Amino acid sequence: MTDDLADRIVRHYERHALAWDRDRQSSVRSGIWNDKSWHDRFIGRLVTGASVLDLGCGPGRPVAQHMTEQGLRVTGVDASPTMISLSNERLPGHEWIIADMRPSAWSALRRHPCLG
């Protein structure tokens, strides 16, 4: 992917962040969280208190919130400042990083089990 295309995708996510969040929260309130069983299997393999890197964390809910409710520490990474702001408002005791999650950015983020 060229940098230009990647930058356009990041701008697209940022432009639609609040609408995406409203839709996601509405779905979860309606009982629709299609990949929850996968997240539960992932969480079940970790010890309480483990640190998890959530790449593309979005707004922190439902995934990061669910992980914190299970006793995990979350470091969330998303290229959208709006998504990171929502995550920080919802789960202030965790680490939220505005960053590119393409492979060239991973070296600083390799200290955690990764969910992304």
Image (cartoon, rainbow, N blue to C red):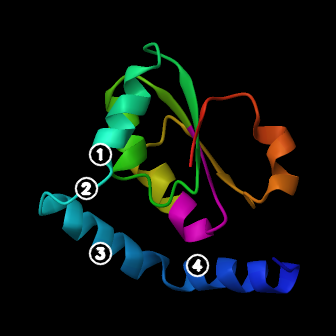
Judge depth for marks 4 and 1 and give the one in front.
1
Q: Is residue 56 left or right of residue 90?
A: right
Type of residue at label 4? Glu
The total of numbered circles placed on residues is 4
Judge depth for marks 2 and 3 and give the one in front.
2
List the residue tagged with mark 2.
Answer: 33
> Does the CB distance between marks 2 and 3 fall below 8 Å?
no
Relative to 26, say whether 8 is above or below.
below
Q: Residue 80 lies in magenta, yes or no?
A: yes
Which segment did they paint magenta?
75-84
Relative to 79, say whether 48 is above or below.
above
Judge depth for marks 4 and 2 and give the one in front.
2
Relative to 82, say whether 13 is above or below.
below
SS for tag 3?
A: helix
Q: Position of residue 105 (x, y in %)?
A: 83, 53
Q: Residues within 10 Å of mark 3 (few under 14, many from 20)?
A: few
Type of residue at label 3? Asp
List the residue tagged with mark 1.
Answer: 36
Type of residue at label 1? Lys
Q: Is residue 39 left or right of residue 98?
A: left
List the residue tagged with mark 3.
Answer: 23
List the residue tagged with mark 4.
Answer: 14
Q: Residues within 10 Å of mark 2 (few under 14, many from 20)?
A: some
Type of residue at label 2? Trp
Relative to 40, say whether 83 is above or below.
below
Q: Quick one: label 4 or label 3, which is nearer the N terminus?
A: 4
> Does the CB distance between marks 1 and 2 fall below 8 Å?
yes
> Image point 76% across, 34% down: which residue?
110
Gap in Å between the C-alphas at discs 4 and 1? Answer: 25 Å
Q: Quadrant of residue 30?
A: bottom left
SS for tag 1?
A: helix
